[in-house]
């Protein structure tokens, strides 16, 4: 996983992004963090909580249509226990996005009361959207803003060059300045990001990655996975993951001369089907202590 860091992230970029975020935090009342509902731990930025400090925040568990519904409910409860509102959304289909504005209003209700008590009628609320690459931030912004770019650059206190969007009559949204990064020094995080395709496949040995996914699927035994590869009458739970990869490739007819299985092709197919939720709605990471 070490090489991955060199490809995409440099300490200089990280420092610059942190500075930009800290400057922008002064302009907003709350922060909405978009994470992948299948990997709610690995798809977060490790420094974000420290950066945000005590700003009100909201978590969007995106791609909820690909994640296990029970697991998503458990994550929502888990965040609630920490005093954080989380909602399940699917930015591609638009599912759950109607909860966003009410959730922001709820999270900021104290702030609104405070502003109203100071005589401000219908105060404008501002929220910043953050998320690591490939969690669906841009599709969220496109959908929720309906291409309605807010023309607020001329207003006092609004930094020029920042991308503001009006998303409700009292709500303005700011896209993150700079790029947030995941926790790349953790091998498991890197693998989980790679399962979902958030990290480029070229960086990782694709067969090894497929075997690590199979290690997980052997324990979870999702019904759709078993049915899709007709594994009902096999002892797949006790197979080595490489053997299982060969078996899956053989069942799909991915053979090369001499009857050997093209395991690279089988690995690509397995990961593609996982990413398209064809193996079932699978959540890879569960809340701690559950």
Image (cartoon, helix red, strand yellow):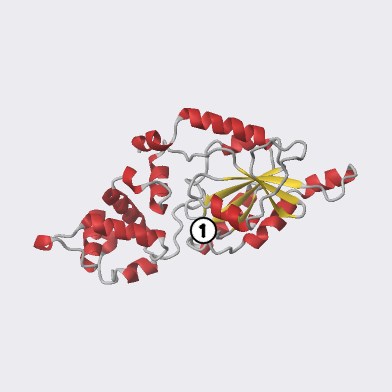
Few, some or many C-alpha atoms within 10 Å of disc 1 (few <14, some 14-19, many ≥20)? many
In the foreground, 175 or 272: 175
In the foreground, 74 or 62: 62
Q: Quadrant of the N terminus?
A: top left
Where's residue 75, x and y in %?
Answer: 56, 54
Decide if residue 78 is on the left or right side of residue 185. Answer: right
Residue at point 58%, 63% (across, down): 94
Dot 1 falls on a residue whose secondary structure is loop
Residue at point 44%, 54% (across, down): 284
- Mark 1 = which residue? 63
Decide if residue 263 is on the left or right side of residue 14. Answer: left
Q: Quadrant of residue 176?
A: top right
Residue 240: in sight, yes or no?
A: no
In the foreground, 255 or 215: 255
Q: Quadrant of residue 153?
A: top right
Residue 173: in sight, yes or no?
A: yes
Of all residues, the one furthest to the left in this rendering is 258
Q: Is residue 222 above or below residue 195?
A: below
Where's residue 207, x and y in %?
Answer: 27, 51
């Amino acid at each position: 996983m070490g090489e991955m860091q060199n490809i995409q992230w440099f300490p200089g970029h990280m420092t610059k992004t942190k500075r930009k975020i800290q400057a922008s935090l002064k302009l907003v009342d709350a922060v909405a963090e978009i994470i992948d509902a299948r990997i709610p731990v690995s798809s977060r930025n490790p420094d974000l909580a420290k950066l945000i400090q005590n700003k009100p925040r909201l978590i969007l568990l995106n791609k909820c249509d690909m994640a296990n519904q029970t697991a998503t409910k458990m994550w929502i409860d888990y965040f609630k226990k920490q005093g954080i509102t989380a909602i399940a959304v699917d930015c591609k289909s638009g599912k759950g996005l109607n909860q966003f504005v009410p959730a922001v209003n709820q999270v900021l209700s104290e702030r609104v009361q405070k502003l109203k008590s100071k005589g401000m009628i219908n105060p404008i609320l501002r929220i910043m959207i953050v998320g690591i690459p490939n969690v669906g931030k841009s599709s969220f912004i496109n959908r929720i803003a309906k291409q309605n770019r807010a023309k607020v650059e001329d207003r006092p206190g609004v930094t020029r060059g920042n991308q503001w969007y009006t998303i409700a009559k009292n709500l303005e949204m700011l896209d993150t300045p700079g790029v947030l990064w995941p926790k790349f020094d953790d091998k498991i995080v890197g693998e989980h990001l790679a399962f979902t395709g958030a990290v480029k496949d070229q960086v990782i040995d694709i067969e090894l990655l497929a075997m690590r996914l199979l290690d997980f699927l052997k324990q979870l035994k999702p019904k759709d996975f078993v049915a899709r590869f007709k594994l009902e009458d096999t002892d797949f739970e006790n197979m080595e993951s490489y053997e299982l990869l060969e078996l899956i490739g053989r069942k799909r007819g991915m053979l090369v001369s001499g009857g050997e299985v093209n395991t690279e092709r089988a690995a690509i197919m397995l990961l593609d089907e996982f990413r398209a939720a064809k193996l079932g709605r699978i959540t890879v990471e569960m809340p701690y202590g559950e």
